[in-house]
Image (cartoon, helix red, strand yellow):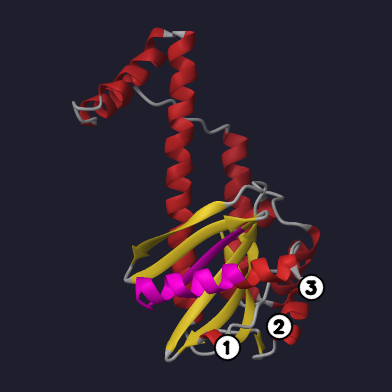
């Protein structure tokens, strides 16, 4: 484990959010790295200080007024929801809870997508692209076994113009996930795969962030993010070919 990977997971280790395998990896790294050991010590001392102080902050009424004032006039429903909290209306509170959940969920998706793009950028640094280097799907896929709760599917798309070049472990949202790496001419495609509790299929959509195109979709309990500087059309083509091959494999 590298220092940059360990630093991402230190807070999760302190909070007890890592599974046993990843906790052992971080602890083993810390045992041999003075820099990360010192950082872990600092984090633990800060956490203890906060807990001992019983630190708690209550937002002042002025904050609510500022939030209401910043809301656009054409969307009074959200202002009404905020007022519902102040009035203590049970119906308004339920509606507000739903609205806040939607907003937080959207914010969470945006944050994770930003982390996905950051992981793609990190991978482009020398020596960071692959942990296992192979064009053989029967070499890449078994490499993930035992390293993740669910190994990402690996399909060979060479005949369709997308060459498999390997895979690696990456870390997004303080959790490990698989990245399957393809190449289209001189362009790298990182396909990040993470398990999700939602088994419903989610149709693909493409967004652009920091100059990179991201194709995101969900299928059979897995979330997929394909990231590349390829044009949106070619990245869509990659995703469609990947999904079609997965469907053929399922039917076969």
* Mark closest to the chain's N terminus, 1 or 3: 3
- Along the viewing direction, whichever of 26 and 37 lies nearer the viewer: 26
Is residue 147 part of the magenta span, yes or no?
A: no
Residue 194 seen = yes
Percent position of residue 16, x then y: 72, 50
- Helix, strand or loop under label 2: helix
- Helix, strand or loop under label 1: helix
What residue is rendered at 63% in x and 85% in y?
A: 166
Start and end of the magenta stretch?
A: 223-244
Disc sitting over residue 158 in the figure: 1
Query: Badge 3 is on which residue?
Result: 145
Percent position of residue 180, x then y: 60, 76
- Along the viewing direction, whichever of 156 and 143 lies nearer the viewer: 156
Query: Badge 2 is on which residue?
Result: 140
- Along the viewing direction, whichever of 216 and 236 lies nearer the viewer: 236
Relative to 100, 165 lies left or right: right
Q: Report the quarter where the C terminus lies.
A: bottom right
């Amino acid at each position: 484990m590298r220092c940059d990977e360990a630093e991402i997971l230190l807070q999760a280790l302190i909070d007890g959010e890592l599974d046993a395998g990843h906790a052992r990896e971080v602890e083993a790294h810390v045992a041999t790295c003075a820099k990360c050991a010192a950082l872990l010590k600092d984090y633990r001392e800060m956490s203890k200080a906060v807990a001992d102080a019983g630190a708690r902050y209550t937002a002042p009424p002025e904050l609510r007024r500022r939030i209401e004032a910043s809301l656009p006039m054409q969307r009074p429903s959200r202002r009404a929801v905020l007022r519902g909290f102040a009035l203590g209306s049970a119906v308004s509170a339920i509606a507000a809870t739903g609205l806040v959940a939607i907003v937080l969920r959207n914010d969470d998706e945006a944050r994770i997508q930003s982390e996905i793009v950051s992981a793609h950028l990190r991978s482009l640094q020398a020596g960071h692209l692959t942990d296992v280097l192979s064009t053989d799907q029967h070499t890449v896929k078994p490499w993930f076994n035992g390293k993740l709760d669910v190994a990402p599917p690996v399909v060979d798309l060479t005949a369709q113009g997308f060459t498999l070049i390997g895979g690696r472990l990456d870390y997004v949202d303080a959790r490990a996930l698989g990245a399957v790496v393809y190449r289209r001419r001189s362009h790298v495609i990182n396909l990040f795969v993470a398990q999700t509790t939602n088994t419903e299929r989610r149709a693909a959509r493409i967004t652009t962030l920091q100059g990179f195109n991201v194709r995101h979709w969900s299928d059979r309990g897995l979330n997929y993010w394909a990231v590349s500087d390829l044009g949106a059309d070619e990245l869509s083509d990659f995703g469609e070919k990947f999904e079609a091959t997965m469907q053929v494999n399922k039917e076969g």
